[in-house]
Image (cartoon, helix red, strand yellow):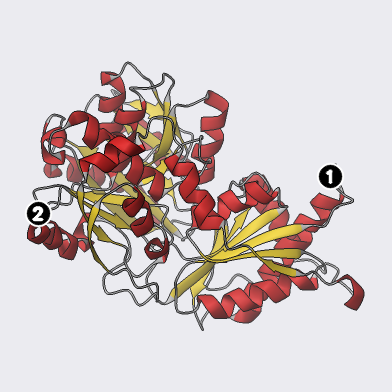
Amino acid sequence: MYEGLMVSVSGVRGRVGEALTPEVVTRFAAGFGAWAHRRWSDGPRSGEPCRVVVGRDSRVSGPMFHRATLAALQSVGCDVIDVGLVPTPSIQLAVEHHHAAGGLAITASHNPIEWNALKFIGPSGLFLDGAEGTEMRGVVESAFPRATWDALGHVETDEQAIERHLAAVLALPFVKVDAIRRREFRVALDCAHGAGGVIIPELLKRLGCEVHAINLETDGRFTRSPEPVAANLGDLERLVLESRAEVGLATDPDVDRLALVSDEGTAIGEDWTLALAARLVLRYRSGPVVANLSTSRIVDDVAKEAGAQVIRAPVGEVNVAVRMRKEGASIGGEGNGGVILSEVHLGRDAPVGVALLLQMLLEDNVPLSAIVARYPRYVIVKDKLDRPNAPLDAVYDALRQGFRDAEADTQDGLRLSWLDRWVHVRPSGTEPIVRVIAEAPNAAAARELVSRSRVPLDALGR
C-alpha cells in the first residue's frame, strides 16, 4: 500500500493525485486515529474522549485532505480539534495545550507544490519516534474497527492556536520585548506563500519592526522553490538591499525552518540559524547544545566560545528533541534552519528563531554581516546515489579503514569528523537513496571528502 509514497517515522508524503490521494490520506488518518484511540483507552484518562488536533499549511491540496482527515478521525470515534491553517509548531503546541491524544499536520514542509503529506504527532507534542511509527503503521495495515453511528467523533474549532504560540514566544525570559520594540528593526520577510503569513508578520509587528514583505499570501502557490536554502532566496536578497533592511527572514511553508539574509543582501546559509540562536541562549543558561549529525560545525564553534558542549543525535527532529530532553539541553535543532527551545516546545519553530535572532542583534548592536564575519566559514557539499541492495556495513568498514585518523560516530550511518571538517554517509529514511554530506573550510576539500566516500558505495552498487 506504500507504492510511490515516502514513509518515514514521522509521516507519509507523496505527489498529489498520484501516490497521495484522498483515499490514502483517509486510510492513514483513520489508522492513526484508531492507534491513538487504543492507546488512550488503555491509559490513565480512558474515561475521557479521545481528541486529536488537526491543522494544515497553505498548500492548494490542503483543504481537500483536511476534509478527508476530519472524516477519517470521526469514523474511528475520535473527537477532532480543528486549528485550521497554522504553522506545524502551532499544531504541536495545541496538542500539548489540549492534552490531546495526538495530532495530524497536513503539510509536505519544504517539498514542491505537487506534494503533500500527513505528519503524525504523539500526545507529547513530538512527532512519533521509530517504535511508535512502526506500531501505528501496523494499525493502518490492519482491519481496525470503525465507530457506529452513535459513537462517531465530533469536531470543534480552536481559533486560538496562533495566539497561544505568539504568547509563548513573546514570554521567553531572554527575549526583551520592550527593548526590541524601541530598537525598531527594519526587517525583510519572505514567507513563500506558506503558513508563515498568518504568524510571522504579526510577531514582527508585536516586536515593533518595520516590515518589508513578499510572498505573504497563504494560497500555497509558491513563486519560488519553497525550501529556504540560499539558492532560492534571490528575491529576498534583493528586497533586503532595496529596503535597506537589517536582516532578511525566510520561512518554509509549514514554518518550522528559518533562513537568514544579512544586511549586505547575502543569504548566509540555513546552518547559521541554529548557531546564532544558540549564541544568544548560551549567554543566559548553561547546558549542552543538541544538533543532528549533518549540522554544520559552526554550531561547535559558537558553543565552544560559550564553554558549552555539542551533542550529536541522529537525523530527524524527534531524535534531536528526545536527546534534548534526556541531556537537559540549553537549546537544540538541525542545520536546516530548525531551532528547538524547550520553553516553547520540543519541536522546530521558526517564530522562536525570529525572536532569538532579533534579541541577539539588539544585544550585539552590530550588523549581522559583522557577527558572521567573526567566525570560520565552511562549505557543505551534498550528494546522493541509489541505495545498493547489499547492506552498507561493508561501506562503513571501508571508510573507517580509509580515514583512520577520523573520529567515527555510528548512531546514524557513519559520520567521520576532524577538527575542521566531516563527512556523513547515511541511508535516507524517506527515499531509496544514500546521502553523502561533507563540510570543510572550502568547496574543494568538501567535494574531495564526498568523492572519496562515494568510492566504496559505487563499488557496492555495481
Q: Secondary structure at mark 2?
A: loop
Q: Amino acid at mark 2?
A: Arg
Q: Quadrant of residue 182?
A: top left
Q: Are dots 2 and 1 in contact, CB under 8 Å?
A: no
Rate crowding at label 2 as few (under 14), some (14 to 19) or many (20 or more) other CA atoms within 10 Å. Answer: some
Q: Is residue 280 visible?
A: yes
Tell me what residue is drawn at x 46 percent, y 38 percent: 171
Residue furthest to the top in view is 307
In the displayed structure image, the side of residue 27 where residue 328 appears, left or right: left
Expressed as whole percent of the image width and height from the top left, the position of residue 429 reads: 50, 53
Q: Position of residue 369 (x, y in %)?
A: 12, 40
| Residue hosting label 2 | 244
Q: Nearer the viewer, residue 34 or 151?
A: 151
Instruction: Assign the C terminus to one quadrant of the image.
Output: bottom left
Q: Residue at x 34, y 34 (%)?
A: 176
Q: Please, what secondary structure does the residue beneath circle 1 have?
A: loop
Q: Is residue 442 above or below residue 231?
A: above
10 Å neighbourhood of mark 1: few (<14), some, or many (≥20)?
few
> Marks 2 and 1, Cα distance to the nearest angstrom?
56 Å
In the image, farthest residue toward the bottom: 17
Residue 126 in percent (x, y) is at: 59, 46
Q: Is residue 24 visible?
A: no
Q: Return the disc, 2 or 1, that comes first in the chain's sequence.
A: 1
Residue 170 image label: none
When the figure is inspected, residue 69 is found, relative to residue 385, above or below; the finding is below
**Going 71% across and 76% down the picture, which residue do you hit?**
71
- Is 269 situated above or below 13? above
Front-lying residue, 129 or 202: 202
Q: Nearer the viewer, residue 146 or 20?
A: 146
> What kind of residue is marked 1?
Gly
Q: Quadrant of residue 22?
A: bottom right
List the residue tagged with mark 1: 43
